[in-house]
Image (tube, rainbow, N blue to C red):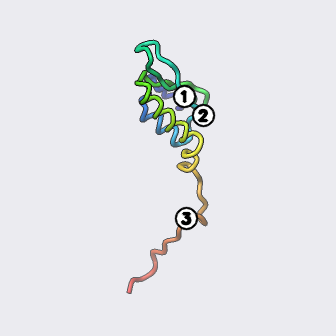
Amino acid sequence: MSGDKLANPRIIELEGMAMTGLLRSVKMVDCQKPLGWKKLVVETQEGEELETGCMEPDAAKRNFMVFTLYIRNWGKLVTKEYSEEDLPTVNFDETRD
């Protein structure tokens, strides 16, 4: 995060970090209050731990699954580097008939 620390990151901010490969792991932990609610704790690639606020268990489970998929699979697709040979070629010099 290069000096900018997220005090209370929102889910959407952490999801963006997961999409772009900035998160290393995610875990779901119990909240003290309200009892039964959960929060997500993520570890950045730099080793910093960030946590969400407490949320209902079903919402926490859904977000946990999405984060896990981004960290393990989808994030690699979003940030995959392509060479020029992989990209389609567009020739703007062609004249139209």
Q: Nearer the viewer, residue 3 or 70?
A: 70
Q: Mark 1 or 3, which is nearer the eye?
A: 1
Task: Assess whether mark 2 and mark 1 are in contact (beta carbons under 8 angstroms).
Answer: yes
Precedes in sequence: disc 2 or disc 3: 2
Q: Please give the name of the residue rendered at 41% of the width and 29% of the height, measured from the top-left corner.
A: 10
Q: Which image quarter: residue 48?
A: top right
Residue topped by disc 1: 42
Please name whichever residue, 5 or 45, is drawn nearer the observer in this view of the structure: 45
* Mark carried by residue 24: 2
Badge 1 element: strand
Q: CA distance from mark 2 to mark 3?
A: 29 Å
Dot placed on the residue nearer the N-terminal end, 1 or 3: 1
Callout 2: SS: strand
The answer for how far apart the CA atoms under marks 1 and 2 are is 7 Å
| In the image: residue 10, left or right of residue 89 | left
Identify the residue at horizontal 45%, vertical 22% (top origin).
7
Residue 8 x/y as whole percent: 43, 23
